[in-house]
Image: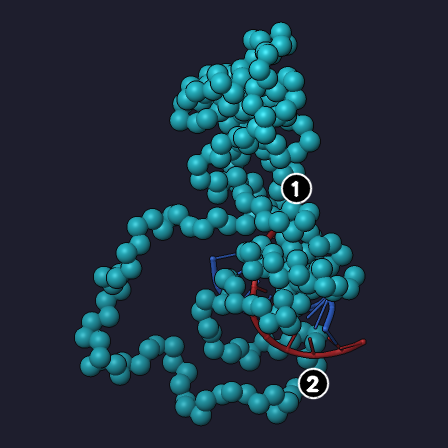
Chain colours: A cyan, B red, C blue
Amino acid sequence: MSWTDERIEQLKKMWEGGATASQIADELGGVSRNAVIGKAHRLGLKARPSPVKAGDKAEKPKSAKKKASPAPKPAAKAEPQKPTPQASPAPSPAPAAAEPKAAPSEPAPQPEQKPAEEQPRIVSVGPGGFLRQGPGDQQAPIPPAPPRRLVPAKPSPEIADKTSLLDLNDRICRWPMGHPGEPDFHFCGEKVNPGFPYCVEHCGRAFQAQLPRGARRPPPPLPFGGPRVR
DNA sequence: CCCTGATTCGC
DNA sequence: GCGAATCAGG
């Protein structure tokens, strides 16, 4: 596979959207995670939370490479080694005047209130490259898709005992059955799971625990998300 | 072990 | 330019 404009664009979008290289890779298809990362770097977009980037360690010349670097290059690369002979990991006790106390407990001037709350994290990306969030990232339950057309003026016998839009209230499940506009479109109507807009069963559909990375294949069926949900 | 991104380097 | 191999942290 080659990097066409479309693929590059999607790579950028997803990368900046926060998707992982693996996700990007298997969404694009035909490329490996490494290819994605490599391409991303070549494109100049990097600087994303990397597990390895946190602490900048000193070099480790001890274990030589197994395969790739057979030739010891004494001067192949200009080592940015500082002439300053500092090898001790302990911070120099010099800055005593500036900071009288650098206690581990900072006043933390940041008015952070809810660190647990963060921006919706992109969990996966749909076929068109649109960014899809994880179920756990959904804040308030989004009102289930406003129907284009309201209930039929003349209720047919079929839906006479079904839960129509007008029957919705805080206590009954708002899970849509069928599709808006269809003659038999109605809502679940069960008693809600307290605190949720849906009944217990449909809560199970609407709110799914964050699955382990391995089993994130089938996107959670959401109301109006797919072909049919019943 | 799994995951992650970063880097290197032969192609 | 590409990406497998490798590294290194979580």
Q: Position of residue A130 (x, y in %)?
A: 62, 49
Q: How many marks?
A: 2
Q: Position of residue A132 (x, y in %)?
A: 58, 46
Is the residue marked by circle 2 packed among few (<14), some (14-19), or many (20+) residues within 10 Å? few
The disc at residue A194 is none
In front of the other: A60 or A4: A4
* Residue drawn 52% across the image and 20% down it: A165
- Name which quarter of the figure residue A13 lies in: bottom right
| Same chain letter for marks 2 and 1 | yes
* Residue drawn 67% across the image and 74% down it: A66
Secondary structure of the residue carrying tag 2 is loop
The C terminus of chain A lies in which quarter of the figure?
top right
Viewer-side label of 2, 1: 1
User: Can you name the residue that lies furthest to the top here?
Assistant: A157
Circle 2 is placed at which residue position? A71
Q: Position of residue A76 (x, y in %)?
A: 64, 89
- First in sequence: mark 2 or mark 1? 2
The N terminus of chain A lies in which quarter of the figure?
bottom right
Circle 1 is placed at which residue position? A217
- Name which quarter of the figure residue A229 lies in: top right
**Chain of residue at mark 2:** A
Q: Is residue A200 visible?
A: no
Whether residue A20 is situated above or below residue A159 in the rendered picture: below
From mark 2 to mark 1, how far is it between C-alphas?
Answer: 44 Å
Secondary structure of the residue carrying tag 1 is loop
* Residue drawn 59% across the image and 76% down it: A63
Whether residue A38 is situated above or below residue A116 in the rendered picture: below
In front of the other: A84 or A54: A54
Q: Amino acid at mark 2?
A: Ala
Whether residue A168 is situated above or below residue A52 in the rendered picture: above
* Residue drawn 43% across the image and 20% down it: A169
